[in-house]
Amino acid sequence: MKIRKFKVPQNLIYLLFIIYSIHDFQAQTLDLKWKVETSGKILAGPVVNNQLAFVGNETGTFMAIQIESGKIEWKFDTRGNIQATALLYEELVFFESANVFYALEQKSGKEVWSYSLKFPAEKFTDASGNEHLYKLDPFDDKRSSGFFHQGIIYVGCSNGKVIGLNSRTGNLEFSIAAKDNAPIRSSPMVAKDKLYFGDWNGIVYCYELKEKKFVWTKNTYREKPYATFGGIATEFRRHKGKLFFGARNPALNVLSLSDGQKEWTYNDPTGGWIIGDPAVFKDTLYMGGSDNFAMLAFNPEDGKVLWKTKRSKNIYGKAVVTKDFVIYGGGNSYDPKDTGELVVLKRSNGELVTHFETSSSVFSSPVLTGSELIIFGSNDGVIYALEIQP
């Protein structure tokens, strides 16, 4: 008996491959491993070592949490309003709370030193007549994190200064002021003995630490169309001679590290701020926007948009970028009762892989641990640890 060979049509093979790929792609989920409930909303992103995650909330509780179990290792109470991601250096953890800077032992939470600005609390009054301390306006949800360089921690302050604190003693070793003492919400960066930071008036600065002088300054906008416009309030990143940062500005301005001149500009067609912290991975820049509700991937050389994924939430934080994924949080800046989400996109093209919904906004930048846990906080006061399951 002669066996006839059946030839599968090429287009059927292609169709089966697509179906398999879609099935495999969509099967991934985010599973909750643990959560920790706290007394206040969490805007700060967690930071981790091999065993512990460190994060604070807006009621002034700073805590260390065991990564594998979610058990609270220790707590440290301050005068309130912790918004920025802490800095780990050697055996200490450094953070700011209500214009006071603290260094604690990572293992025990014991205070090693603190430094106070002795600066009157910044405040604003909302439309209902309620006064809000340590806020410049209703959307002032980001504060400066520290940057460690040669034994000094550089950090931006509400009094318009970047200060440098001795990492061992907390003594003030360095101080420079922004123009007009504009508050500094950006997280500074040091590269090749040059300090880079931005202020609330939208000016970027480059300061030479050894020569003790400003190398250049650059104003990132010409006109201020409304009161909340223009402030620089993100981390700074460098890549191949370029400086990346976010601001309350629909124009993403990328500057030259050497002289501050514009390398390229991306103008968001919706007019939404590009206020997410920049992340660079494998020669691609990833940044989120606020009212455009979008995560964007750029060619960092020329600003070409490689992909843009729009959802329905404002993005304020920094994405975690891996070989396969872009992971970030989103929320509603205008309605505190609305839900938030942790989103996982496919890094190659921005397609949605999966998402996890929380009861309130996620403006806390997630962190990925060595055990592949995604840890982040939410405005609902909960710290979450999620696993990506196939």
Image: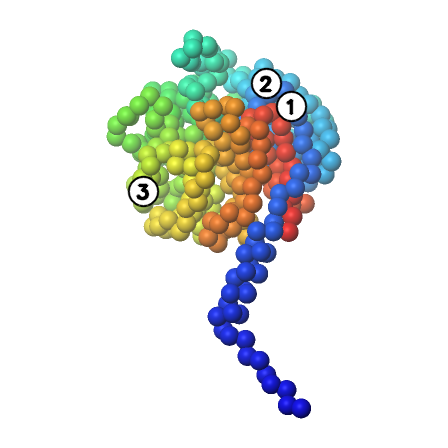
Q: CA distance from mark 1 to mark 3?
A: 40 Å
Question: In the depicted view, which residue is nearer to us: 243 or 222?
Answer: 222
Q: Nearer the viewer, residue 206 or 184?
A: 184
Residue 10 higher or lower than 383, as above or below: below
Q: Amino acid at mark 3?
A: Thr
Residue situated furthest left in the rendering: 222
Which of the two marks, 1 or 3, is nearer to us in this view? 1
Can you name the residue that lies furthest to the bottom here? 1
- Give the CA separation, mark 2 to mark 3: 38 Å
Please identify the quarter of the rendering in which residue 45 is found.
Answer: top right
Q: Which residue is denoted by mark 1 in the rendering?
A: 38
Residue marked by disc 2:
59
Q: Residue furthest front?
A: 1
Res. 307 in view:
yes
Upstream in sequence: badge 2 or badge 3: 2
Give the numbered dot on residue 265: 3
Q: Of 188 and 368, which appears nearest the observer?
A: 368
Hey, which quadrant is residue 53 in on the image? top right
Residue 366: x and y, percent?
A: 57, 37
Q: Residue at x 53, y 70 (%)?
A: 13
Q: Are marks 2 and 1 in contact (CB under 8 Å)?
A: yes
